[in-house]
Each structure stands twice: as structure tokens, then as C-alpha cells.
Image (cartoon, rainbow, N blue to C red):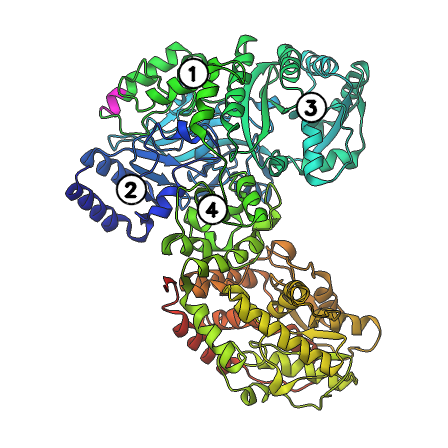
Amino acid sequence: MPKEREESLQKDLLQHFGDRVSFNKVERLVYSHDMGVIPEQIRRLIQFLPDAVVQPISRDELVKLTQLSREYSIPLVPRGAGTSGFGGAVPTRKGIVVDFCRMKHRIEVNEKELTVTVDPGVVFEDLQKHLQARGYDLRIFPSSARSATVAGWVAQGGSGYGSFEYGDLKNNLKEVELVLPNGRIVTLQGRELDLVYGLCGITGLISSVTLYIREKDNYVVNLASFSNLADVTRALLKIRDQGVPLWSATLSTPSFIQLKQNAAQHFVLPQDRYLLLVVYPHQRKATVEAALAKIITESGGEFLSQRLAQEEWEDRFYPMRFKKLGPSLVASEVLIPIEKLGELVSEIERRYKGEFALEGTMASRDTIALLGFMLTDERKAGFPLAYANSLTVISLGEKLGGRVYSIGMYFVDRAETMFGREILERVWSWKKEIDPQGLMNPGKILPPSLDKTSPVKALVAALKAADATKSIVGLAGKLMLKMQGENFTSPFSEELTRDTLACALCGYCRNTCTVFDAYPWESRSPRGKYYLLNQIIKGNLSLDEEVAAALFQCTTCKRCDLVCQVKSHNAENWISLRPCFHAAGLENLGLKAVRENVLRTGNFFGIPAAERIKWLKVPVQERGKIAFWSGCWASTIMSNMAYYFTSILDKIGVDFVHFKEQEGCCGLYLALGGYTEDFAANVKRNLSLFKEAGIETLVLACPGCYATFSENYPHVAAQLGLEFNIKIKHTTVFLYELIQTGKLKFEKPLSCTVTYHDSCHVGRWFGIYEEPRAIIRSIPGVELKEMEHNRENSLCCGLMLAFDYLPGVVHCGQRKLAEAEATGAQYLITNCAGCGSQFHTTLTLANSKVKQLDLSELVAMALGIPTVNQTPTILAFMEKVTEQMRESRMVKTG
């Protein structure tokens, strides 16, 4: 496209979509791929980098996009969550990627018809939670339900959990609303669904989907074990032929079980047997239980314990746990008649000697979707050969009457086998009518034999050549070996490099990420970050301001760690990158200012030391076994926390040390900024202070300080050759222990309702969930009401976003406000000065009926300790912090 024309397009997109369009090179790069990993030499055969990414929020905006597409002759590439590996959401002729992540709010249940109508970007996990809360459930859902979108699965097509009973997704669709390439809006039902289902959006942009649902029922889960595949097949055939009304059935082979357990280092399942996981509704138990037991026994199987069955079911969304052993893998998926299951699996096991780990889920009563994984390492020259082998598995399945699971971009030459000639010709005829320019997701579904202008001709030819090798020593394999080149040299640590390559690209982290929730661009998600690191490792990307800005954004909340397929330590990984920024001459302006304050005055805010201890009203020791560390935030912006805690200790007669003016900063923000030398000097200073005072236990009010002293100090002390044998405790644990020993008792009832916020660095980082709740329940007259997200699922306060995205701080505060108000509680209890000041400000400015209290204040109230009004101080400091961070961003310093 000529430059003048390109500038005109960008101007039009900005006019209509504002900050929901991106031309940023980083953003375009992370939207240029899906979950699949293919050899670079094959990927280079298409124009995979889009010109722009747009995030529409309405059907009208979808219509506008089709208008601009026609006007500028630019392709549109619809994208759900990018959880497929078939290339359906990958650009082939550049164009505009249409990201549906913001179209996710409409969920309308029709109880009479048992249907639900949803926006295209609704995630299956969220939809299921919504339905179950109202007494309904999905009939089927994909194995990627934690991230897959409804419209994305419609465009992809396929089967999943529940397909044994209900068939594939098409059988569970009532209607699909579609914005055609010519701008018309149509609703497709019945036979017309052939014109949208499984077509990757080549006929239009899906604007809504109506699914059939069912009434909710509890699942009964059984896990059966078999010594050989013939017995498993026999059992499945008997279940089918006798009409046993199962809902879902999943097969795991010994190689799959071995890899899965090796990755988790959790060995509870037999590793030399085939396992069959069957699920059915509880209301059918009387019908199914005896018939199933008879079939399993007659087929030579035996049931394993209910505990193991439930554990397997709860792990159903994590088939790629073992990817980190690769740290890469190639996947292959084929649909096969169950009569041919044993023959196909046996041939794969014979050829690859267990290198292909296989798992299968029944796609109907007659067919099974067999998913195979081969571990490899994409850094190695042999990676293309592993990829070629994955294609061979599909060919083996086809010879036995099976077919590839989906078409997407990589298997367009198999489209007729997938859809049948009649449907394919109908689609092609309609496509030419409504999209004469071929702008809607070109290069997908339609084979070059039909679409003479297909941009994937060379790619299809390359894949055919790879498939034709039939072995790892074929001509195409040797050519790909030569093109792959030498191993990649990573600029990062081995641990970070392995986690980067091990990322399954499943996108589960997106639905939990605090940053992505506030700023829903792929580059800000953990998956997006790992993809950027992957490209840096491969030499396709340099670490500049744009890249560093994306890699920097993280609140360190660890919500993504809970759902990570390969259990990476994501927050630690992002923090470990900070020194790399400095090495590249990059620095965050906000953290730079904080560093200057810490080095000059010993605290975040740059306040003189004497002013930081005005809250101290009780006598303290200079030497002793127990010391209280108040921290920057809990001694300034929320100095009431330090005042209440020390007043509590004084009231019940617990002696403690406080360092007064000598107390500096724990160094958290030096570590977050990547200032390693400054942090080491800070550690040395503080450890000297503790040693001189004879400290054995350090009690901290700030979770950030608690995490820093607990995790960073032992490591740095060892590097410096210093002794570190101090017990670290958060105030919540310390107060809980005082209650347990009878030292702290409550007699005065408070008569109030409260809800409790689990801060990230006390909760997810260290698992302190029950101690604060026990404290609350021990106070007479206090009723605890839990928020929707609590304990390990608690929402992050988002305050760390202030360093590069202030609107995100507001977004996080408002989400917590809504959850707190929904409980009907009078008080929102916190245990962190950062969380407390954020929520105190949000609740105050919103004039909410809910008021923020620190846990120490609640305890102080129960003990009759005089309270203080901290609101003016909090609001003044938060205004100062906001102003200080307004220009904070990543910049080049060298």
C-alpha cells in the first residue's frame, strides 16, 4: 500500500477506534501468530505481520471495519483468543487483525428455549460460571475453555468435553449473527450454519452466537485402567453399542501419563497402562453405574480411586503440562473412528517409540479426536524434522479413515475431505458473491485449486513436501535442517529462556492478568511477553523502548502463576528482566525518581527520616529479639497502620525494637527497578542494623517489605557472604499467633460486617489466607462476608500500574469497589499500605458506603485503642504519587 494511502487508513482507523487501534510494531508482532509453533522457514512464506490491530466493541463497529476494508482493499483477520494451532487467526497478506477481546459483555439466557446468546469475545470459562450460578450449564466446551472464546470456537470448529453425548459444536449451535464482507448483517441457522461454522471467518465477522444449554447437574467421574489398547477400544465400543449415556470420555496413553507426571513430579497414576476417564451427570448414576462397571470389568479394566479420578478431571484443561520438558513441542490432531483407534495408536507407538504422547477425547459416540505431542526444542536444528513427523501422524490417521481435526491455514489442501465437496462449493460460491475482493481472512480454508489468488500456495507446497518425507531423513527434512541454521544463543538466563520457550501460548494467563484486564492488549499479557522474549532470543527483535515498555508492565500479583500450563514463575521472570533494561540503556522514569528518593532519604516519598516516625507514641527498645519494621508506606501515607500495630503490642505488653530514624527502605523498588548494586548495598546496611540490635524475628506491616526480606534478602546475603538467619513475619501472622497463645484477647463486641482483601504479596506469594480470617472471626460481633474473588483468586489492587499506566490503577480500584459493595459489608479490611491507600482513595472519592480499614485498626477498635482519621493524609499522598507518576514511562537513557 502506498505511504499516502497507508497514512489515510491510519487516520480513519484512529478517528473511529481511538485508543482501540494499534500500529505499534510490538503489538502487531504479538498478533501475528497463534498457539502453533512452526519452523521459521515455513512461516516466512506468508506476510504474517499485520498493518494494524483493532479492538471493536459493537456490531456497528464491525460494519465500519468491513467498509474500510473494501475502501482500502485491505484484508480483515478475525481473532478470538488465538488458542488454535491451525493458523486460522494468522495474517497471510498483512491487513487488520480484528481482536474481539472487548466484545465480551452480553450473556442472555433464554430459559424457555434453553439457549444463551453471547457476544463473540465471551470466554467459555466465564460463560460457564455465569450459567452455573443460574442453574444451567454448557452442553459441551473445549479443552481450552479457560481462554477460548465462543466465536473463536465457532470459527475454528471442533469437539470437546461433552461431545460423546452432544457431538461437535455445530450440533449445539442455534444461530450465528454475521457481519458480511459487504457490510450486510445476516443470521444463520440450520443448514446455513455451513456458511460460517469451521470457516475461520472467511465469510464474515461473527457478532453474536446462540448456543443450546442444559440444566445444571453435578458430574460423576470415573477413571478406569487397562493393560492394553485393544481392551480400551473394546470397552468404548461396548459403551457405544449398549447405549450407555455417558457425557464425556477421554483416553490417556502410557507415554502421555509418563510425561505429565514427570513434568509435575507427581507420581500417582500407573505409567504402563491406558487410562479412560468417563464423565456423566449425577442424575444418571442409577442407570450408568452398574452398566459401566460391567463393561469395564468384561473388557479387562479396573477402576482407580475416586480421588485419582477427581484429580484427573480437575486437571482437564492442562494437557500440555509437560511442554517445559522440551522446552518446545509440536502437536498433531486427527479425528479417527474408534474401531481404528488401536491400529493408529499402535502404529504411532511403533514408529516413534513413545516419543509421541497421545491423549484422545471422544468427539461423538463413533469418533475420537486424538491429540499427539512430540517434545522438541525449537532452538535446535532438528526442530523442522519433529514438525514433519507431526504431519506424518495426520497422514497415518487419514489412511485409516480419519481426517485432520481442523483446516485453518495449514491444511487447506484437505478442505474437501473435511467439509465435503457440496459444502465446500457452496461456501466458495457464496464467498465470491459477498467478498469479490477476497479480503476476509485470505488464505484460510479454501485450497489454491479453488482460490487461484490464495496467498498460501507456497506454504501449502512446503507442508506437502515435509509431509511427503514420511521419515526424518527425507529430502524435505534435510532441506529444512539446512535452512534452520545453528542453535539460538539467548541473551537471558537459562531459566528465563526455558520458561520462554516452554510457554504453551494457551492464553490462560490473559483471563487472570491484572494488567491485561485493565489494558487488554496482547503485548501486556504474560503470553505476549513470552512471545516477545521468544523473538528476541531468535534474533528477530531488539530490546528497545517499545519492547521494554511491554515487558515492564506487571503488578507482580502472581494471578497468572495459578493458571500457567507449565507452572512458570512469571512474576519473578519479569522482575529478573529489569537489569537487562539497564544493560540496554533503558529506564523507567517513575522508578528512577523513587530510587533517588530512597538513596537520598531512605524512603519512597523522599520524606526526612524524623517526619516518618511521628506516629510512634509508645516506648520501644534499642536491642531485643523482636523488631517491628514499619516500611515506607505504612509509616507515611498509612501511618495509622504502624500506630495501631505498635499500640496493640504496647497494650498487651509485648516488647519490641523499632529503629526510628535509622529505619530506611527494604529496597523493594530498587529491586523492581533493576538497580542491583544499590539493592545489594541496601541489604548490607539493613542486615548490619539487625545484627547490631540482636534481632531474631522481624515483623513487617508491608507485604512488599515482607516479600523482599523473605525472598530477596537470603539470596543477596549469600552472594555477599553475609549471615541471614532472621525469622520474617507479617503482622497478620504475628497477631494470629498472639491470639493462639492467649496473649491477645477480645472482650468488647464491635457489631459490624466486614469483607477482607487478600493482598498479592501476603496471599499468592506466601499463602497467608486463613490467619487474617481467624483474627477477624475471633473478634466478637464481627461478621465476615467474602467477596466474589477471594484468597488465591483475589483481585490485585493494581497500584503498581502507576509506574506506566495510571488509568489501570483506577480500573482496578473500581473493580474492587464493586465487589466490596456487592457483599453489603460496612468495612473493607486490608493488610497492606499500598492496597489500603488505593482502596481508601477509591471508596472515598466514590462516596461509597463501604469504608476501608487496616486489619490492625479493626483489632485496635476491639481493644478500645483511640482511632485516627487518616483520610486527609491518604488523599494528599495519593495525589502527590499520581502527579509524580504522570510522566512515568520507559525511556532510553544512553
Pick whichever of labels 1 and 3 is earlier in the sequence. Answer: 3
Residue beneath disc 1: 464
Q: Give percent across and percent down for residue 535.
A: 43, 42
CA gap, disc 1 to disc 2? 41 Å
Find the distance from the CA under tag 1 to the CA under tag 3.
29 Å
Which label lies toward us, 1 or 3?
A: 1
The mark lying in front, picked from 4 and 2, is 4
Magenta stretch holds residue 433 = yes
Residue to which mark 3 is pinned: 253
Q: Earlier in the sequence, mark 2 or mark 3?
A: 2
Badge 1 or badge 2: first in the primary sequence: 2
Q: Which mark is residue 163?
A: none
Mark sitting on residue 60: 2
Q: Which mark is residue 533?
A: 4
Numbered range of the magenta stretch: 432-436
Pick the quarter of the image with the C terminus: bottom left
The kind of secondary structure element at disc 1 is helix
Write down the quadrant of residue 262 in the picture: top right
| Rendered residue at 49%/26% (across/down) | 384
Q: Mark 4: which secondary structure?
A: helix
